[in-house]
Image: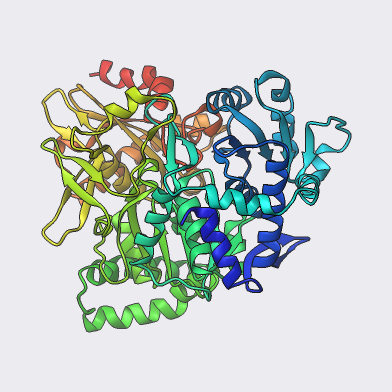
């Protein structure tokens, strides 16, 4: 089936069941399949009525929310191609992608996006309509080419409903469903074309490994413009009849977990890092007995996690300590996540094995997976039946993976994209002569069939001594320290490895208070000799504990007084570092480390 055919079939099966949870007026409200699908088909009829043809491009620029799903379903049901755009994009970036995709209609969410995109109606050739989710965002705008989502749906009421049947019947599984522009971590964004077959094949292969059904609730908090949330947190959930609840924002996720009480969720490692850091921060502010108990429990989690990860029984002494820690600390952490969480799926970036083990001991299962936009996205994933921390799990049953001579992961199968939009040259560059997609990632398959990712091929650092260093491995080890929020290694063709270090500023401030370090700004604080010495010792001790080889250990570092900035292009909307841009921004400071000897 195509995606809209699948959605219609599920609607017919579960018409009166709950489909979404949407927060309005301070509380979550249920939306049934009937309400959702009726709304979406009205949008589809309206788009068809104004001349949108099968294969035409229609874009969505919005944070993840219920209306995003309605618009997407309407677009696909009309036979059009959905072009999702990240709401963090600047106006010039949006303009460029609308022009490249040939978008005719643009859906946007709120006042901020209206302000950004209104001028584009006059600047982008072929863009003919702006549709706004929040009607209050267009009050005072009197233009025929600007309408609210509900007003567009009302126009659909005047279009014969048979147009939906005709469009659905005409769609083929190998038709393009979406064009997703990559986040550009390695250069200019590319338009990845994914077909209906690509995505449904990935949904079905993933569901062969996970038991998800109408009784499950998913809390969506990643961008729907990213294929991970879109496939695993939206289409897959609709396929199974699970309920999708939308977090209000990434800042409110912690509270929304308690309100929605999900049973499953798709997330990225940065979220788990923040949860773990949040537990530590809250404990640090608590009275001494609570603080001591919490940090003791986290130590138990790390110890027990190592044993549980080996699938061995806990020794009696550790078993007793684990039971006590679970009662007084771990159970409260699970309660903060709603108390019903069966498991998380983690993707988008490598998950620290130490972090995964700690959560495992706390009774929170995180199944790490791996994939790319070009593979719809899942290639491999740990599952309740087969899991091994430190790997990204077994390869999906409908995919073929092989490792090239240089270690690059190659993949072939029904979820692999047909090519880049209007770019045959780049498409040819990423496929082997026998049709395998070259992922650009370095990895290995172990004897049990588990895939392990070493690093991005383009990210590998080759030192002056000819040693290969996988930066993500070292960065994840450093980030396990509560005093380090982010780290980026540097040192290609250099005689040693250096790093940019972003401190966890709350913990650094506590350290400064404890040591009586006075400062007038964060810039003064990170430059203080005592702070520099503290981070030098911290980094060396962390690396020694992890038994890193000398050639892959950080020798010198730059301590930053701010986070990597999304508005400067330093991180993607899914919080992945853009190494090339960060390196350009801090090259002077990094090179100075080598000039000093």
| Residue 192 vertical placement versus 397 (above, below) | above
Image location of residue 12, percent across then percent down: 60, 69
Image location of residue 449, percent across then percent down: 17, 59
On the question of residue 162 being in view, the answer is yes
On the question of residue 281 being in view, the answer is no
Q: State the count of labels.
A: 0
Q: Nearer the viewer, residue 400 or 453?
A: 400
The image quadrant of residue 426 is: top left
The image quadrant of residue 531 is: top left
Q: Which residue is drawn at 45% across and 34% down?
A: 183
Q: Nearer the viewer, residue 323 or 101?
A: 101
| Residue 115 vertical placement versus 108 (above, below) | above
Q: Residue at x 24, y 59 (%)?
A: 394
Quadrant of the image containing the C terminus? top left
Q: Nearer the viewer, residue 226 or 337?
A: 226
Q: Residue at x 51, y 29 (%)?
A: 523
Image location of residue 31, percent across then percent down: 69, 66
Image location of residue 539, percent across then percent down: 29, 42
| Residue 170 vertical placement versus 447 (above, below) | above
Q: Is residue 62 left or right of residue 26?
A: left
State the scheme by which the image is colored: rainbow
Q: Which of 202 and 52 is in front in this view?
A: 52
């Amino acid at each position: 089936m195509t995606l809209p055919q699948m959605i219609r079939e599920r609607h017919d099966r579960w018409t009166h069941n709950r489909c979404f949870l949407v927060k309005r007026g301070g509380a979550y409200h249920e939306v049934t399949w009937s309400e959702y699908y009726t709304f979406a088909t009205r949008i589809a009829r309206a788009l068809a009525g104004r001349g949108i043809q099968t294969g035409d491009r229609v874009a969505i620029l919005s944070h993840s929310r219920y209306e995003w799903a309605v618009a997407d379903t309407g677009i696909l049901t009309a036979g059009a191609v959905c072009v999702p755009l990240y709401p963090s994009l600047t106006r010039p970036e949006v303009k460029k992608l609308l022009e490249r995709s040939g978008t005719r209609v643009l859906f946007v969410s709120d006042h901020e996006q209206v302000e950004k995109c209104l001028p584009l109606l006059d600047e982008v050739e072929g863009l003919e309509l702006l549709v706004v989710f929040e009607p209050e965002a267009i009050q005072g705008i009197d233009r025929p080419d600007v309408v609210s989502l509900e007003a567009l749906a009302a126009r659909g009421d005047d279009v014969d409903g048979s147009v939906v049947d005709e469009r659905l019947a005409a769609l083929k599984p190998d038709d393009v469903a979406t064009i997703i522009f990559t986040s550009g971590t390695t250069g200019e964004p590319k338009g990845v074309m994914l077909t209906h077959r690509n995505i449904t094949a990935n949904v079905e292969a993933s569901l062969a490994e996970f038991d998800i059904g109408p009784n499950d609730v998913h809390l969506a908090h990643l961008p729907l413009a990213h294929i991970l949330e879109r496939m695993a947190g939206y289409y897959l959930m609709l396929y199974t009849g699970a309920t999708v609840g939308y977090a209000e924002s990434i800042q409110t996720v912690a509270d929304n977990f308690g309100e929605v009480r999900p049973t499953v969720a798709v997330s990225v490692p940065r979220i788990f890092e923040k949860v773990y850091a949040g537990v530590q921060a809250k404990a640090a502010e608590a009275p001494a007995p609570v603080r001591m108990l919490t940090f003791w429990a986290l130590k138990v989690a790390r110890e027990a996690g190592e044993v549980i990860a080996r699938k061995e029984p806990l020794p009696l002494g550790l078993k007793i300590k684990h039971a006590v820690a679970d009662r007084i600390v771990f159970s409260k952490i699970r309660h903060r996540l709603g108390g019903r969480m069966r498991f998380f799926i983690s993707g988008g970036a490598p998950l620290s094995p130490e972090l995964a083990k700690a959560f495992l001991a706390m009774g929170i299962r995180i199944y790490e997976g791996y994939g790319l936009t070009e593979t719809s996205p899942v290639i491999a994933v740990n599952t309740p039946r087969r899991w091994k921390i430190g790997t990204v799990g077994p390869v999906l049953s409908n995919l073929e993976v092989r490792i090239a001579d240089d270690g690059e992961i190659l993949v072939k199968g029904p979820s692999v994209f047909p090519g880049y939009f209007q770019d045959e040259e780049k498409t040819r560059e990423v496929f082997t002569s026998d049709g395998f997609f070259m992922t650009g990632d370095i990895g290995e398959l172990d004897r049990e069939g588990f895939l392990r990712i070493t690093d991005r091929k383009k990210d590998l650092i080759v030192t002056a001594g000819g040693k290969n260093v996988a930066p993500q491995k070292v960065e994840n080890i450093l980030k396990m320290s509560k005093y380090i929020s982010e780290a980026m290694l540097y040192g290609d063709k250099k005689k040693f490895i250096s790093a940019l270090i972003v401190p966890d500023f709350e913990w650094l401030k506590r350290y400064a208070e404890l040591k009586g370090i006075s400062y007038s700004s964060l810039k003064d604080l990170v430059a203080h000799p005592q702070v520099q010495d503290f981070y030098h010792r911290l980094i060396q001790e962390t690396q020694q504990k992890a038994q890193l080889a000398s050639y892959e250990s950080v020798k010198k570092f730059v301590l930053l007084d701010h986070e990597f900035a999304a508005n400067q292009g330093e991180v993607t909307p899914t919080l992945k570092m853009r190494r090339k841009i960060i390196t350009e921004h801090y090259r002077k400071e990094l090179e100075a480390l080598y000039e000093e000897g």
